[in-house]
Amino acid sequence: MGAIAAVFATASLAGGTLSLRLHYPMVCGQPGRGPLVVSLPAAFRVASVRVRVRGAVQPASLHGRTVTIELPKPPQVTCMSIAEGTLPITIATLRAPAGSYVVRARIDTHAFAASLHVR
């Protein structure tokens, strides 16, 4: 019997930049079909967003506290390897008062919730 894949997220906020790391099964190391949707806590103040996925700038839109991020298109090569992968995302220009929060994200069929403590 195969192992059950872990789906989880970690988050940190420093200098106005939220760093998320989403861990989930990926096909050939690709993040999958987008978009990636990140729901920010109500206490966060967001004027605009600058987003990077795996270090590359990606188009994103902001609607209230929801950030919708376009993901890079996967390569055209057919691959059937499924393995645990990590998708690093940074969202810049955020402000949050001290406190404990939960940041939620979803991509394709995966849902994530990460605890975040701001000092």
Image (cartoon, rainbow, N blue to C red):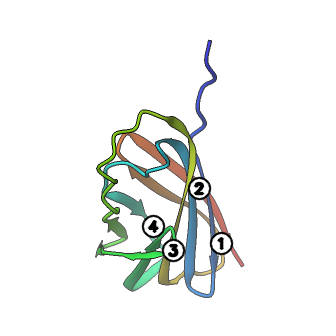
Instruction: Tell me, yes or no, whether the two marked residues, 3 and 2, touch with CB atoms within 8 Å.
Output: no
Amino acid at pointer 4: Leu
Q: Residue at x 41, y 62 (%)?
A: 39
**Crowdedness near tag 1: few (<14), some (14–19) or many (≥20) residues, C-alpha within 10 Å:** few
Q: Residue at x 45, y 75 (%)?
A: 56
Nearer to us in this view, 114 or 90: 90
Cα–Cα gap, marks 2 and 1:
14 Å
Q: Secondary structure at mark 4?
A: loop
Residue under label 1: 99
Instruction: Tell me, yes or no, whether the two marked residues, 2 and 1, touch with CB atoms within 8 Å.
Output: no
Tell which circle, 4 or 3, labels the residue nearer the N-terminal end. 4
Residue under label 4: 40
Look at the image and tell me in which quarter the N terminus lies: top right
Q: Secondary structure at mark 1?
A: strand
**Looking at the rendered structure, which numbered label has been put on residue 55?**
3
Residue 111, quarter of picture: top left
Please tell me whether mark 2 or mark 1 is closer to you in this view. Answer: 2
Instruction: Tell me, yes or no, whether the two marked residues, 4 and 2, touch with CB atoms within 8 Å.
Output: no
